[in-house]
Image: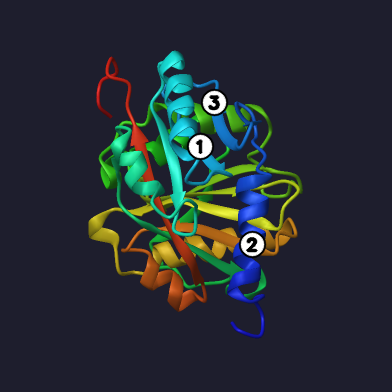
């Protein structure tokens, strides 16, 4: 990979600029910059919202954290401060904890050159991959999501339906958008995943890959990565990016992804909201 990817430092700088500092959003989400902070907001109830980038230091961090807490408290919304290992100030994580945020599990920011990911990976003969093009397909994705991750993210269903209504479900489109794919064993969904195409950037990002426990170890997750790489290549996105869990990191490394840094969610919850 050393001869294909830019240096890790250069690639990290590109990632930081395109997907954080100058981030865009597809409806129903929106990105706004307020002073030194870039935040992602959504019009879907209970959807993911976050501070995704901040230009702060030791003298400004506490006041800016307090401003963001006040903003989201007024919205009555849970939000994430998407912390990266290189963010400043160096003690930002401790400041977030002191302000009432809860730390969640670390993930690795991993990137691969789209063209380097094999487009064809053999699937078990009993498995077929189906792009999600309607509400019934969305329900299959959510069935896998519930069984694998154990969460009831109804906002995610609405987000995918919104994408379909906006015409984002076609594998042949060339602009930004999102697609979901489900792996089927007969009539049973056994794995699902999503890909988001970040318009105006070099990146497509991979999300939500999950396989039912009894179907793991058969190459299905790997095949879904390769399938999505083909979609990204068809839309001329140079890089694939993943926020990778410890379970998926070894698979992605074998496929050719490199680790750029670590990201850690710090989550603030309004006291009046039920835990999620």
On the image, numbered disc 3 is attached to which residue?
42
Residue shown at 67% from the left, 29% from the top: 166
Q: Which mark is residue 104?
A: none
Q: How is the image coloured?
A: rainbow
Using the image as rendered, state which of residue 248 and residue 261 is in the foreground: 261
On the image, numbered disc 1 is attached to which residue?
51
Is 235 placed left or right of 180 in the picture?
A: right
Q: Quadrant of residue 162?
A: top right
Coordinates of residue 110 in the picture (x, y in percent): 50, 65
- The mark nearer the N terminus, 2 or 3, is 2
On the image, numbered disc 2 is attached to which residue?
13
Using the image as rendered, state which of residue 77 and residue 249 is in the foreground: 77
Coordinates of residue 256 in the picture (x, y in percent): 52, 76
- The mark nearer the N terminus, 2 or 1, is 2
Q: Secondary structure at mark 2?
A: helix
Q: Secondary structure at mark 3?
A: strand
Coordinates of residue 34 in the picture (x, y in percent): 63, 29
Disc 1 residue crowd, few under 14, some 14–19, many 20+, Cα 10 Å: many
Q: CA distance from mark 1 to mark 3?
A: 12 Å
Q: CA distance from mark 2 to mark 3?
A: 26 Å
Q: Secondary structure at mark 1?
A: strand
Q: Quadrant of residue 41?
A: top right
């Amino acid at each position: 990979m050393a001869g294909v990817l830019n240096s890790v430092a250069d690639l990290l700088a590109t990632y930081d600029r395109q997907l954080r500092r100058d981030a865009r959003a597809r409806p129903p989400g929106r990105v706004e910059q307020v002073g030194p902070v870039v935040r992602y907001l959504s019009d879907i109830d209970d959807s993911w919202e976050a501070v995704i980038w901040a230009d702060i230091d030791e003298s400004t961090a506490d006041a800016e954290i307090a401003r963001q807490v006040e903003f989201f408290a007024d919205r009555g919304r849970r939000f994430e401060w998407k912390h990266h290992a290189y963010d400043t100030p160096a003690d930002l994580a401790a400041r977030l904890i002191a302000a009432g945020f809860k730390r969640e599990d670390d993930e690795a920011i991993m990137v691969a050159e789209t063209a380097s990911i094999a487009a064809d990976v053999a699937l078990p003969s009993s498995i077929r991959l189906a792009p999600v093009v309607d509400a019934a397909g969305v329900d299959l994705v959510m069935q896998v999501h519930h069984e694998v991750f154990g969460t009831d993210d109804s906002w995610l269903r609405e987000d995918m339906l919104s994408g379909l209504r906006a015409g984002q479900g076609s594998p042949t489109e060339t602009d930004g958008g999102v697609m979901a794919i489900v792996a089927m064993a007969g009539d049973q969904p056994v794995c699902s995943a999503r890909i988001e195409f970040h318009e105006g950037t070099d990146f497509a990002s991979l999300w939500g890959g999950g396989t039912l426990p009894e179907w793991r170890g058969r190459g299905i997750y790997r095949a879904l990565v390769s399938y999505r790489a083909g979609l990204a290549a068809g839309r001329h996105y140079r890089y694939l990016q993943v926020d990778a869990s410890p379970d998926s990191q070894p698979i992605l490394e074998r496929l050719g992804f490199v680790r750029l840094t670590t990201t850690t969610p710090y989550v603030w919850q309004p006291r009046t909201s039920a835990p999620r």
